[in-house]
Image (spheres, coloured by chain):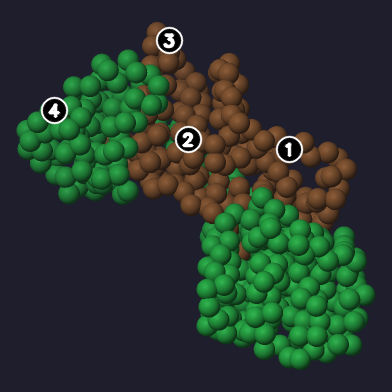
Chain colours: A brown, B green
C-alpha cells in the first residue's frame, strides 16, 4: 500500500549519527563519576547499556518519537535529573481502552509489544506500531554501531 | 454528504459546476445539487437512493471544506471511478491541478493528527493515477456497496453484506490502519514474509506480531550482549576518545573500521581539545564540531577551520594506519 507509507515516516539518521552520540555519551559517562571507578563489571555493563539506549534515543530524534521521549525520561528519573519535555500525555482510560482496542487476539500481542517498546503503555495500537517500526530501525542501527565498535576494539 | 459537499466546497463553490461537468458524470449528476455526493458515485439513482438512506450524518459540506485536505471527499470506492477522471482532472486546469498537488502533498503529511481512519482514506489516491490505487479499494470493490461517514474525514466503503453502523465501520477503518502498519513492520522484520500477508486469518496477524516481538527482543538482547562485550574489552569505563583510538591503532587491521576521516581527525582532536571537550560537559559543545564534520565527511578540513590545527602531519601519520583498512562500515 504505497499510500499508507507516505504518511508514516520512519526514517532514522545515518549510522554515523548514532556512532557519534554513542561515543559522546560514553565519554560523558566517564566524566560523570571521575572519582569512583567501579571495578565491578556489572556496573560497567549497566552503564554502557544505559548509555547505548540514551544515545540511541538522542540520535533518533530526541523528542520526535514517543519512545525516545519515554526512554530519556526514564533514564533521567534514575539519575534524579529533572527532565522536562513538552509531553503530550494521553491518559487512556479503561473505557477508552475498550473502544480502542478490541481484537483480543491482536491485543494480547500488542500488550507484549507495549511492554517492550518504551513508552508504549499509553499509545493507541496504530501509533504503537509506528513507534515499533521506528524503534526497530533505531535498534538495528545501534546494534551495528556497537558491533563495529566492539570489532574495532577487540584485541586481535 | 460531505463527499460532494467537500468536493464542491473544495472548488470554492464557484467552480462547482465546472468541476462536476468536467467529470462527465452524466446528466443526472447535473440535476443533483452540488452537495449530492451520489453524483460522484456514478450509480444509478435507485442505488443512490439506497445509499442515501444509510447516511445519517447531515451534509455539512461548508463546514467540512475549510478544513481543506482532510475533509476532502475520499471514498475508497471512488478510487476506481475518479482514477479515470484523474486524467481529465489534470487537464482541466489550475483548480484541479491544485487539487492534485495538494492531495499529493497531503498524502505525505502525517495524517495521525486527524481521525484515525483518515489514514486509510486514500484521500490522496482519489486524484492519483489508477496504478496507485490502494489495495483495500480493490479488495472491497463491489457493486452494491454502502457508504458511511463517521467523521467528516472518513469515508469507508463497507463490504457487501456487512453492517454499516458507525462502530463497525470505524473499527474496520481502524483495523485497516493497523494492518497498513503491520505490513510496514513486516517488511522491516526479516523472516516475516513467510507468514501469510493477508489479514484474513487471525493467526496471520498473531504470528506476525509474535515475529515482531521476537525481533525486538532479540535486538534488545543483542544490545545487552554487545554492551557486555564492550565492557570487557575496555577495562576502564572511561571511554575517552583517545583510549578508543589508541586501542584502535594497535588493532586496526582487517577493515573493521571504515571511518578514515574519523581516524584522521580524532587523534588530534583529542590531543588538542580534550581539555575543553571535557570541560564542556553538555552535549551542545561537542556537537558543534562533529556535526559539521559529519555532514561533509571532510573532517580534516573542518578541523582546520575549527581549531586551526594543521592536519597535514596527521594525514601523514594516519597514512601509517592504513586508512584503507581502518574502515568502519558506516
Q: CA distance from mark 4 to mark 1?
A: 50 Å
A78 vs A95, left or right, is left
For label 2, the crowd category at 10 Å Cα-Cα, with few meaning under 14, some 14 to 19 and many 20 or more, is: many
Q: Earlier in the sequence, mark 3 or mark 1?
A: 3
For label 1, the crowd category at 10 Å Cα-Cα, with few meaning under 14, some 14 to 19 and many 20 or more, is: few
Q: Earlier in the sequence, mark 2 or mark 3?
A: 3
Q: Nearer the viewer, residue B160 or B11?
A: B11
For label 4, the crowd category at 10 Å Cα-Cα, with few meaning under 14, some 14 to 19 and many 20 or more, is: few
For label 3, the crowd category at 10 Å Cα-Cα, with few meaning under 14, some 14 to 19 and many 20 or more, is: few
Of all chains, the one bearing label 1 is: A
Q: Nearer the viewer, residue B99 or A132?
A: B99
- Identify the residue under disc 3: A36
Q: CA distance from mark 3 to mark 1?
A: 40 Å
Of all chains, the one bearing label 2 is: A
Secondary element type, mark 2: helix
Q: CA distance from mark 2 to mark 1?
A: 22 Å
Label disc, if present, on residue B308 of the rendered structure: 4
Instruction: Give the x, y percent position of residue A109.
Output: 73, 51
Q: Given contact means CB atoms under 8 Å apart, are the residues at marks 2 and 1 in contact?
A: no
Residue B12 can be seen, yes or no: yes
Instruction: Examine the rendered structure and indicate whether residue B149 appears above or below residue B139.
Output: above
A49 vs B167, left or right, is left
A32 vs B318, left or right, is right
The residue that appears at 64% across and 61% down in the rendered structure is B69
Q: Earlier in the sequence, mark 2 or mark 1?
A: 2
- Identify the residue under disc 2: A58
Secondary element type, mark 1: loop
Do badges 3 and 1 share one subunit?
Answer: yes
- Identify the residue under disc 1: A90
Q: Given contact means CB atoms under 8 Å apart, are the residues at marks 4 and 3 in contact?
A: no
Q: Quadrant of residue B187?
A: bottom right
Label disc, if present, on residue B188 of the rendered structure: none
Amino acid at each position: 500500500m504505497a499510500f499508507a507509507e507516505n504518511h508514516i515516516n520512519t526514517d532514522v539518521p545515518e549510522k554515523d549519527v548514532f556512532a557519534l552520540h554513542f561515543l559522546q555519551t560514553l565519554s560523558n559517562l566517564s566524566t560523570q563519576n571521575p572519582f569512583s571507578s567501579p571495578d565491578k563489571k556489572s556496573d560497567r555493563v549497566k552503564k554502557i547499556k544505559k548509555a547505548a539506549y540514551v544515545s540511541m534515543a538522542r540520535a533518533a530524534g530526541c523528542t520526535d518519537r514517543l519512545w525516545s521521549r519515554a526512554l530519556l525520561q526514564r533514564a533521567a528519573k534514575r539519575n534524579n535529573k529533572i527532565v522536562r519535555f513538552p509531553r503530550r500525555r494521553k491518559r487512556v482510560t479503561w473505557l477508552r481502552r475498550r473502544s480502542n482496542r478490541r481484537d483480543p487476539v491482536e491485543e494480547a500481542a500488542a500488550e507484549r509489544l507495549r511492554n517492550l517498546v518504551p513508552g508504549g503503555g499509553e499509545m493507541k495500537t496504530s501509533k504503537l506500531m509506528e513507534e515499533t517500526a521506528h524503534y526497530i530501525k533505531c535498534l538495528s542501527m545501534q546494534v551495528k554501531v556497537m558491533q563495529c565498535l566492539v570489532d574495532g576494539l577487540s584485541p586481535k | 454528504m460531505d463527499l460532494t459537499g467537500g468536493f464542491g466546497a473544495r472548488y470554492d463553490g464557484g467552480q462547482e459546476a465546472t468541476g462536476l461537468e468536467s467529470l462527465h458524470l452524466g446528466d443526472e449528476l447535473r440535476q443533483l445539487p452540488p452537495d449530492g455526493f451520489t453524483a460522484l458515485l456514478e450509480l444509478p439513482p435507485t442505488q443512490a437512493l439506497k445509499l442515501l438512506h444509510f447516511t445519517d450524518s447531515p451534509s455539512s459540506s461548508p463546514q467540512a471544506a475549510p478544513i481543506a485536505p482532510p475533509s476532502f471527499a475520499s471514498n475508497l470506492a471512488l478510487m476506481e471511478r475518479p482514477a479515470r477522471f484523474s486524467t481529465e482532472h489534470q487537464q482541466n486546469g489550475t483548480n484541479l491541478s491544485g487539487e492534485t498537488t495538494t492531495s499529493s502533498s497531503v498524502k505525505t503529511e502525517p495524517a495521525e493528527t486527524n481521525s484515525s481512519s483518515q489514514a486509510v482514506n486514500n484521500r490522496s489516491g482519489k486524484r492519483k493515477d489508477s496504478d496507485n490505487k490502494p489495495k483495500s479499494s480493490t479488495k472491497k470493490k463491489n457493486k452494491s456497496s454502502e457508504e458511511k461517514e463517521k467523521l467528516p474525514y472518513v469515508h469507508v466503503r463497507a463490504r457487501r453484506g456487512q453492517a454499516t453502523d458507525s462502530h463497525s465501520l470505524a473499527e474496520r477503518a481502524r483495523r485497516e490502519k493497523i494492518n497498513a502498519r503491520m505490513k510496514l513492520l513486516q517488511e522491516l522484520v526479516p523472516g516475516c514474509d513467510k507468514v501469510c500477508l493477508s489479514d484474513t486469518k487471525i493467526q496471520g496477524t498473531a504470528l506476525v506480531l509474535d515475529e515482531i516481538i521476537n525481533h525486538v527482543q532479540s535486538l534488545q538482547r543483542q544490545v545487552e550482549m554487545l554492551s557486555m562485550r564492550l565492557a570487557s574489552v575496555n577495562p576502564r569505563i572511561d571511554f575517552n576518545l583517545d583510549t578508543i583510538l589508541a586501542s584502535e591503532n594497535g588493532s586496526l587491521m582487517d577493515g573493521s573500521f571504515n571511518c578514515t576521516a574519523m581516524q584522521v581527525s580524532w587523534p588530534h582532536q583529542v590531543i588538542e581539545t580534550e581539555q575543553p571537550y571535557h570541560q564542556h560537559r553538555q552535549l551542545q559543545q561537542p556537537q558543534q564540531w562533529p556535526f559539521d564534520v559529519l555532514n561533509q565527511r571532510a573532517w580534516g578540513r573542518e578541523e582546520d577551520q575549527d581549531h586551526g590545527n594543521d592536519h597535514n602531519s596527521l594525514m601523514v601519520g594516519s597514512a601509517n594506519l592504513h586508512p584503507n583498512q581502518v574502515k568502519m562500515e558506516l
